[in-house]
């Protein structure tokens, strides 16, 4: 059961069901946790409710020789109402990892039958050790998986922040250049030139605002606070708006649009527009000044990933 388990909790019922007849027990269950207050049930077999927490029980005392293992009676501060005389005795085998408690294997047995004999004691001890090893293995696997996810997340965030910091420099450079022209007393500017410089500053400030918003969205996505909406959209409208946001940076590049006959789509309008703007920005940065950029929309049976053009290619599509 443990060798083929998806999880230790999934294997416990089969193990417990085998222990009941083989060790002469009435019921068996397994709990995990660092101490009595933290222990939680992960699997059981047998009929009837479990004994209440804190009930008097016997604990297996592990001797060097398993045949000399003995059961030691333990009585805790048990409320009088929990001292039920149901004809059963409660036994406990602690599971440990490097001397630290990680849980317990519990069992009930007819009180008249006395404590388990040497063979049953050995069986319970081996079962507790194997289940304890499996619990430890599951915990280490979970820690490894979490560490890998954290490492991949950190690598992705580093890549995104590096890309974002590069993207931030472009609008900042344009804003500084336009502002520097306006502040230069040696340069005489007409009213139209001043207006164009102000338009450039405003346009690049809006772009900078979008980039900063994207970086903030990264934190909101990780926190689960950013949820994509779903609206009926016309793709041609989305593409047209996206082009209007990048055409000033396109220079002499000609951006061509080819939309599918079925232009309807369901998506978050802001996120989809931002995705198209990002693709166009990549195309603008990766292609020569006079190369055309073709933007096509088509309906695919499943999401498709199209690689971006290599730097220096003559066309961006």
Image (cartoon, rainbow, N blue to C red):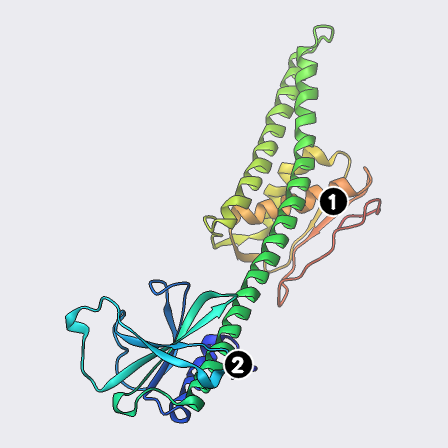
Residue 207, image quadrant: top right
* Residue 117 in picture, x, y percent from top left: 39, 90
Under circle 2, the secondary element is loop
* Residue 220 in picture, x, y percent from top left: 49, 45
| Residue nearest the viewer, comparing 224 with 95 | 95
| Residue nearest the viewer, comparing 183 with 146 | 146
- In-image side of 171 versus 18 (left or right): right
Q: CA distance from mark 1 to mark 2?
A: 54 Å
- In-image side of 115 versus 292 (left or right): left
| Residue nearest the viewer, comparing 250 with 180 | 180
- Disc 1 packing (10 Å; few <14; some 14–19; many ≥20): many
Q: Residue at 49% across / 65% down in the picture?
A: 99
* Residue 236 in picture, x, y percent from top left: 60, 50
| Residue nearest the viewer, comparing 248 with 215 | 215
Under circle 1, the secondary element is helix
Identify the residue position indicated by label 1 in the image. 283
Between disc 1 and disc 2, whose residue precedes? 2
Identify the residue position indicated by label 2 in the image. 2
Is 171 situated above or below 163?
above
């Amino acid at each position: 059961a443990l060798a083929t388990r998806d999880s230790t909790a999934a294997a416990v019922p089969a193990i417990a069901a085998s222990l009941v007849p083989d060790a002469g027990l009435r019921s068996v269950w397994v709990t995990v946790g660092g101490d009595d207050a933290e222990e939680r049930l992960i699997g059981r077999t047998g009929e009837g409710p479990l004994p209440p927490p804190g009930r008097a029980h016997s604990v297996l005392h592990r001797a060097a020789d398993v045949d000399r293992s003995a059961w030691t009676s333990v009585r805790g501060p048990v409320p009088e109402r929990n001292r039920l005389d149901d004809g059963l005795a409660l036994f406990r085998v602690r599971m440990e990892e490097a001397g630290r408690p990680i849980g317990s294997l519990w069992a009930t047995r007819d009180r008249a039958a006395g404590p388990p004999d040497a063979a049953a004691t050995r069986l319970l001890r081996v079962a507790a050790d194997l289940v304890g090893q499996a619990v430890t293995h599951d915990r280490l696997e979970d820690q490894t998986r979490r560490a890998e996810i954290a490492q991949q997340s950190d690598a992705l965030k580093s890549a995104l922040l590096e890309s974002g910091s590069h993207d931030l420099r472009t609008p900042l450079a344009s804003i500084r250049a336009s502002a520097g022209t306006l502040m230069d007393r040696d340069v005489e500017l007409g009213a139209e030139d001043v207006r164009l410089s102000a338009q450039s500053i405003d346009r690049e400030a809006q772009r900078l605002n979008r980039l900063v918003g994207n970086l903030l969205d990264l934190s909101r996505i990780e926190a689960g606070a950013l949820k994509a909406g779903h609206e009926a959209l016309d793709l041609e409208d989305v593409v047209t708006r996206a082009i209007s946001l990048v055409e000033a940076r396109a220079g002499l590049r000609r951006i061509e649009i080819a939309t599918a006959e079925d232009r309807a789509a369901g998506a978050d309008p802001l996120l989809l527009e931002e995705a198209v703007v990002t693709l166009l920005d990549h195309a603008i940065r990766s292609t020569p000044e006079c190369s055309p950029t073709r933007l096509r929309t088509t309906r695919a049976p499943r999401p498709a990933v199209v690689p971006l053009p290599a730097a220096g290619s003559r066309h961006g599509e």
